[in-house]
Each structure stands twice: as C-alpha cells, then as structure tokens.
Amino acid sequence: MAGLISKKQRREAEIPTSSMADIAFLLLIFFLVTTTIDVDTGIGMTLPPKLDENVDPPPVKDRNMLKILVNTQGQVLLEDEPSAINMIRAEVMKHVLNCVSSQYNCSEEYSENPDKAVVSIKTDRQTPYDVYIQTLDEVWMGYFEIWDQLARQRGFASYNAYKDQLAEGQDNEINKEIKAQISLAEPDPGQ
Amino acid sequence: MSVHFKKKAANAQTAIPTASLPDIIFMLLIFFMVTTVLRETTVQVRTILPQAEAIEKIEQKRLVTYVYIGPKKLQNNQVGETAIQIDDALVDEVTNVRTIMYNKLTEQPRLIVSLRVDESSEMGKVIDVQQELREAGTLRINYSSKRDIEGTL
C-alpha cells in the first residue's frame, strides 16, 4: 500500500527560454534588412525672412556685391563678364578677402571688407536646376576654402576638423569671423 | 613522487555560457529598431538629385520635411509635367505649400525643409516654392544633393 501513496511530483511551471535567442535573431534580421543608415546630405541655406512691402531692402554698395547671373541656357555671367562655372570659386575668395588677405591688393572692384561682401545669385525662371546647384556649390566652396585657411591658422587640419571638435553650443568662431552672405535674387518679372 | 607531478587532465568546462546570448541579441535588436525609419511615403515624382561638393549632413532627421519637385512619374517609365509633392500627396497649387508648411512649422518650430529637386527641373518652380516657404516662415532649407564622387577638380 505504501506504494500507492506516491509522492506528488510538483513540476515547476517553466517557459522554455532556449528559443528566445532565435526569436530575437529573427526580429534582428528583419530590422537589419529594413534599416537604411544613409544620411541625408545637401547644401544648407537660410532663406531671407519675408520683407515688409513698405520698407525697401537695405542698400548694398555696388562694389560689395558680387553678381552672378545664370541664364536660360545655363551660361554664367560673373560681374557682367561671361565666365565658366569653375571660375566662381576663386572669384568669390578674391571678392571676400579683397582687403584682408595679403594675396589681394584691395582693388576698387571688389568688396571693402568681408562683413560687407555679398554674393548674389540670380537665375531665370527657365534656368536648369542642376546648373543653379553647381553655381551655388561653387560659391559655398569659395567660402569653405576661406574657412579652411582660417582653420589652418588656428592649427587645425581643415575647417571640418575644426567644426568636429566644437562642443555643443560652442560658438563657431571661424563662421563668425567671415560670414557667408549669399543672396538669392528673384528673377525679373515678365520673364 | 611521480604521482604528485602527474599532470592532471584539464577538467575545466570549455562550454561558452550562452545564457546572456538573448540579451546581447536584444541589445542589437533595440539598436536597429531605434535607428530604423520605415519608408512611409511613395514618391510620385522622379527626383534624380544633383551632385555637389559643399554639402553637409542633416543630423536630426526628425526635423526634416521633404518637398519633392520633379516630373511626374507615369506608366511605362515615362515622365510627365513637373509636379510638387509634400509627404504623400501631390500639391496642385503652389500656394497650398504655404498652408501646409505653416501647419508643420507650428508643430515643429525648428523645421528644416529639404528640397529634393530633380536635376532637370527649371528654376521657376523652385523659386515659386521658395517664395511660399518664405511666406510660411520656414526659412531653413536644404537643397538635397549627393556627394560628388569623382570630384569636380
């Protein structure tokens, strides 16, 4: 009889966890496949705020303005001279650093000082977009080369190296010293 | 004596403990879950982006709203007229851009508008959109472009 009074075997209620890793792997692979880590890149710009119609825009002296015109065929007029797109970069540097750098001799044709220097890009309504981007890119590269020079004076390899070491919220001194002032002009009405 | 110096058979267990394996996998999983952005829009216009050199990365994707400008995709790989698309829908009237952007700006004051414009587009449409953006007050824009692989110089 003693055999009948068997001990009740209490099984522990356990969820098998050995397949947990497999399930996690499956999910992992799904997200691995769907993830795109490509970062969005582009040329950043800040549009001018909307102007009050009664107030005229501030006047800019003609010598402080570097005018770039891009026409319908994608041809570039740089200060009223036909020019190639890849000439713009050097011209922008010359314009901005005219009276600062020893390389240039403060000519009457170009800006008085970097603070006053403005680069203006004007297009037609039919101008192809990619020519506009190439032009804008060249202007930005002109500024980037200036900033590169300033960064090297501060002992950095390049402007990007300088920018990378800046802490969050720290002022970008190079950017402050020479500001990129690019004006996007509206096309003439009636075109 | 020889008994003392007899080399004992190594009886340490050689199995790698796998108990923490799920945790490691979960950690990876969570990383990818957080970084994943599931594509939520179907782009109805063709946007072949131009190439540029002076480009910067947009770090905070959450701030970005895309405006697509390009020829409308038709059947059989053909393209139609230039159209503007914001989010999922085509925008018929350029002036509607203003309202849409203004609403987005009130939700996200640090909005960046990324203009994904097809390289064959004409400037007219881009300028129109820019004027509307100025009206709406969304002044931070970004001309989306790819890095120039060959280099222009």
Image (cartoon, rainbow, N blue to C red):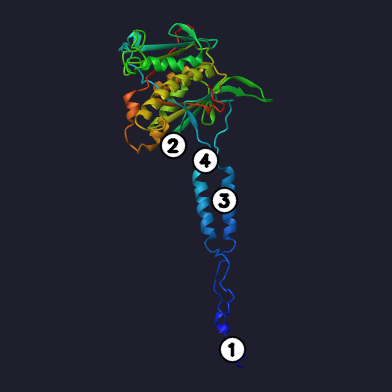
Q: Which residue is mark 4?
A: B37
Q: CA distance from mark 2 to mark 4?
A: 12 Å
Can you tell which of label 3 and label 1 is closer to the viewer?
Answer: 3
Tag 2, which secondary structure?
loop
Determine which of the numbered discs, if any, sits on residue A28 in the image. 3
User: Do discs 2 and 4 belong to a common subunit?
Assistant: yes
Q: Is residue B37 left or right of residue A160?
A: right
Instruction: Kindly check if marks 3 and 1 are in contact, taking CB atoms under 8 A apart as contact.
Output: no
Towards the viewer: A47 or A4? A47
Query: Hey, what amino acid is under mark 4?
Result: Val
User: Do discs 3 and 4 belong to a common subunit?
Assistant: no
Q: CA distance from mark 2 to mark 1?
A: 71 Å
Q: Which residue is mark 2?
A: B60
Q: Chain of mark 4?
A: B
Asked if residue B138 shows in the view, the reply is no
Please give the name of the residue rendered at 51% of the width and 9% of the height, measured from the top-left corner. Answer: A71
Towards the viewer: B53 or A146? A146
User: Do discs 2 and 3 belong to a common subunit?
Assistant: no
Instruction: Kindly check if marks 3 and 4 are in contact, taking CB atoms under 8 A apart as contact.
Output: no
Q: Which residue is mark 1?
A: A5
Instruction: Locate the N terminus of chain A and report the quarter of the image it occupies.
Output: bottom right
